[in-house]
Amino acid sequence: VKSSEPALRRGPKGQRGEVADRIVSSARKSFSTNGFTGTTNRAVAQAAGVDAALVSYYFPDKAALLTAALEPPAGFIEAVKGGVATPIFRRGRALVQTLIGQWENPRSAEIHRSIILTAAHEPIAMDRLRQVFGQNLLASVSASLDDDERVLRAGLVASQMIGLAMARYVWQVGALASLPSEDVVRYVAPTIQRYLSGRL
Amino acid sequence: VKSSEPALRRGPKGQRGEVADRIVSSARKSFSTNGFTGTTNRAVAQAAGVDAALVSYYFPDKAALLTAALEPPAGFIEAVKGGVATPIFRRGRALVQTLIGQWENPRSAEIHRSIILTAAHEPIAMDRLRQVFGQNLLASVSASLDDDERVLRAGLVASQMIGLAMARYVWQVGALASLPSEDVVRYVAPTIQRYLSGRL
């Protein structure tokens, strides 16, 4: 978040938001398809329907553009906080519902999908994803546990959450892709709950 | 497997194996980093240290090269069969051990990693992965269940297996990356076991 803020703060107010958003959205598509090296200011500008000079105006370099493209969607942090604020004995269910909510909203789904695909071939993106995952999932595990156990449980939660997102939304593996969301919650929540607070 | 066989069968015996292997290995790296479009015969040949004409000799087109690059590593099918042949009440543990065995052997790990990364941006690779996953995991679920339940349970198994591979070996999320493999089995096997045969 931090490194992209200075860039986003530039420019006249009103318009800025919309133009910068269009640039970021087109950059996100390009990074996930063509990688960091394969992404150019010119192509991003063209896909966004803006002048190439505007891209460098808002984003001083490609790294700043990548940082902005890897920002979690609006509402993501709040959604995770909502899950985390749920009492521990129902938190497994709440976290699966949060994940589903994020992926079943087309706007945030597109952002998560791009981030995952970009992370598959860009180490910077992978680090960023690891960081966002780390912070948010670590917070989901009871603060009363010792640090080693919290990190372990958060990692196990991550393994099932990442796999559910990949299998259901990215790869769309067989039955998982078409399952009603309440069934996904029913089947997967007990796994998350055990990783959060069950006997390991 | 099928579509690459005719290509691999060509050429004089002895040498063929080693040269074709080098070509496939270099193609695999290129597909996972540069995608299908960004991969050229010339670059693959150069990285493999062979003449570009040899690439087209063994692989009539880029699609044949991609098919060969997406082949699961030697021993994979047998390893999965071993897991599947384990009695159902211990099969969760056996499948997690199979996954770990595949990823902790550097040779097969490199192949699995490339396939996953290629699948992240190449629809053909994603289809192929879905197919391999589908066949192998479907076989791991009891044949005595009705088809809908088998497909559902196999999908749930896939979600945890994919996530474990991604979190531990590809993204190397915190604690999971450094956990001794017997601990991974202990923590994750009960999840797989429930998806295979437990109450959902």
Image (tube, coloured by chain):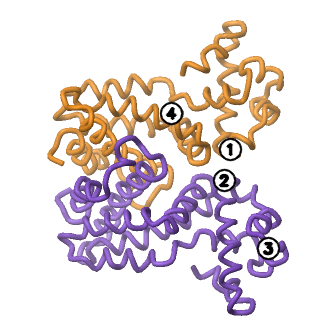
Chain colours: A orange, B purple
Q: Nearer the viewer, residue B44 or A86?
A: B44
The reply to whether the C-beta atoms of the residues labelled 3 and 2 are less than 8 Å apart is no
Say if residue A15 shows up in the picture.
yes
Residue position for label 3: B50
Q: Residues within 10 Å of mark 1 (few under 14, many from 20)?
A: many
Q: Name the kind of residue labelled 2 in the image.
A: Thr
Looking at the image, can residue B130 be seen?
Answer: no
Question: Residue B6 at what x, y percent from top left?
Answer: 68, 86
Q: For the point 24% across and 48% down, which residue is it? A: A191
Please state, as top left, top right, bottom left or bottom right, where the N terminus of chain B lies in the image.
Answer: bottom right
Taking the image as shown, residue A192 lies to the left or right of residue A68, namely left
| Residue type pointed to by label 3 | Val
Q: Residue at x 33, y 60 (%)?
A: B157
- Tell me whether the residue at label 2 lies in contact with that at label 1, contact meaning CB atoms closer than 8 angstroms: yes
Question: What residue sits right under mark 2 in the picture?
Answer: B33
- Could you tell me if the residues under marks 3 and 4 are in contact, i.e. CB atoms within 8 Å? no
Residue A87: image quadrant is top left
Most distant residue in the bottom direction: B13
**Alpha-carbon span between mark 3 and mark 2:** 20 Å
Cα distance between the residues tagged 2 and 1: 8 Å
Place residue B61 in its image quadrant: bottom right
Measuring from the top left, give residue A152's x and y in whole percent.
Answer: 29, 41
Residue located beneath label 1 in the image: A35
The reply, left or right, for residue A50 in relation to residue A191 is right
Q: Which residue is mark 4?
A: A108
